[in-house]
Amino acid sequence: MKLSPGERVFEIVNYVFLTIASALFLIPVLSVLSTSLISRAEYARRGAFILVPQAISLEAYKLLLAQGSIIYSAYLVTFFRTFVGTFLNLVFTASLAYVLARKQLPGRTFLTLIVFFTMLFSGGLIPTFVLVGSLGLLNSVWSLILPGLINPWYLLIMRNFFMGIPQELEEAATVDGANPLTIFWQIVLPLSLPSVATIGLFYAVWHWNSWFDAAIYIKDQDKMPIQVILRSLLDQSQVFQTQIQDPALANADPLVVPPGPVLDAAMIIISTVPILIVYPFIQKYFVKGALIGSVKG
């Protein structure tokens, strides 16, 4: 198809704009990555936040990932929270969303309003802390998962998606002898894979990046997720002043330890790369799920 002059100009401007926008997003990431790869000597000469290191140095990564480092236990906690938490989030969110999507459910509108009400008002930090403590979840990894088991906004999105599935499919399955649980797992969920993948990605990113609840509920250092360790390092001008003591850092020679900004950059890369690797595998489902509720021609 031959483009008109106006369409060709628009296409060129669009490509230029997207290229500039992509560069604006990539330059900060490249700067953090490059900063994490410079040596102590290069930092003294050039400072931090460079785009291209003169010589690649892995001093910061070797120190942070040394044997006995707290990073490993923090990663285990974060992976457990992300995978187990996301799985439970999807199970409970999808189950409740499917129930609220059924038109034959008595009081469906009232129950949906109750869910929506929790989006507008919450108990607050202190009542939530008291509730978590009364349930015996303090200083437990489950305190990072169970209080946020269902996000009401994601629940309503998934409910609306389930309501868009033709009712005739479920009626046909019922005639064939399928019970509601079989219909949900074998018919509704496979048809809702884009929605489930999108909501699952949102839950996973929330679990991976969350630190505030761990800072409140968790006391033991070996139960801290990676984001709490990252925040502790970023909040301190000197690594050895951090409240969370990493044995690998405490036993290191201060004269060979990379500067604080270099360690901060390396820690940011360590804590963000895993979640970035996951996205390409579910990108196609995310693009479909992001269009939920859009107007179809």
Image: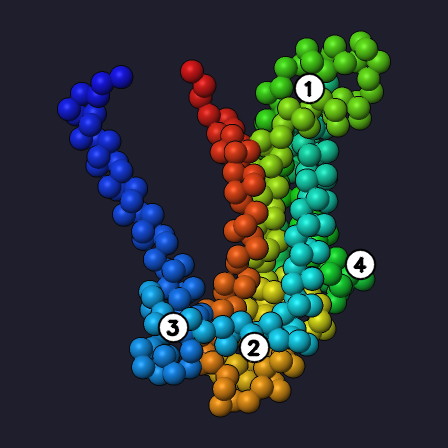
Measure the alpha-carbon separation of dots 2 and 3.
Answer: 18 Å
For label 4, the crowd category at 10 Å Cα-Cα, with few meaning under 14, some 14 to 19 and many 20 or more, is few
Q: The N terminus appears in which quarter of the rendering? A: top left
Of labels 1 and 2, earlier in sequence is 2
Neighbourhood count class around disc 3 (C-alpha, 10 Å): few under 14, some 14–19, many 20 upward: few
Tell me if label 2 and label 4 are in contact, CB under 8 Å.
no
The circle on residue 63 is: 2
Question: Which badge, 4 or 3, comes first in the chain's sequence?
Answer: 3
In this orientation, does residue 217 appear? yes
- Is the residue under label 3 in contact with that under label 2 (CB below 8 Å)? no
Q: Which mark is residue 55?
A: 3
Closer to the chain start, of discs 4 and 1, is: 1
Residue at image coords 21%, 36%:
13
Single out the mark in the foreground, 2 or 3.
Answer: 3
Q: Position of residue 220 (x, y in %)?
A: 72, 73
Q: Nearer the viewer, residue 43 or 244?
A: 43
Q: Residue at x 80, y 9 (%)?
A: 175
Name the residue type under label 3: Ala
